Image (cartoon, helix red, strand yellow):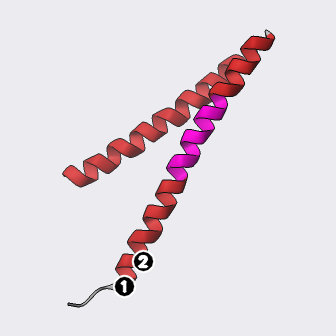
Amino acid sequence: MNIDWAALGSVFGVSLVATVALVGLFTLGIVGLAKQESASAQGATGSVTPARVGAYTCFALCVAAVAYGIYLIVA
């Protein structure tokens, strides 16, 4: 049995980067929702919408990345 260590390392590296990016995006979405809630509790109306849009964009990118991963596995 012969293992291609370069290919295994490449898969590990790409998986690590993708995982960190996905967790980072989700974290940004959570932070955006927290900023939106704290801004709305203080009565600021101007900064609520960008925080909500940014959070929803991060969550949409997370869903797109997961859907693409499932597509790669199935297809």
Are dots 2 and 1 in contact, CB under 8 Å?
yes
Give the answer, above or below, for where 56 lies relative to 71.
above
Give the answer, above or below, for where 6 lies relative to 62.
below
User: What's the residue at 47%, 57% (across, down)?
Assistant: 18
Residue in front for this viewpoint, 55 or 38? 38
Q: Which residues are magenta?
A: 21-32
Give the answer, above or below, for where 64 lies relative to 3.
above
Residue in front for this viewpoint, 39 or 64? 39
Crowding at label 2, few (<14), some or many (≥20) Cα neighbours within 10 Å? Answer: few
Residue that numbered label 2 is attached to: 9
Q: Amino acid at mark 1?
A: Trp
Q: Secondary structure at mark 2?
A: helix
- Residue 26 picture quarter: top right
User: Image quadrant for the N terminus?
Assistant: bottom left
Q: Is residue 23 magenta?
A: yes
Q: Is residue 12 magenta?
A: no
Direction from residue 52 to residue 43 in the image, left or right: right
Q: Amino acid at mark 2?
A: Gly
Which disc, if any, is residue 5? 1
Query: Residue 54 placed where, x, y %?
Result: 61, 30
Q: CA distance from mark 2 to mark 1?
A: 6 Å
Query: Residue 58 placed where, x, y %?
Result: 54, 36
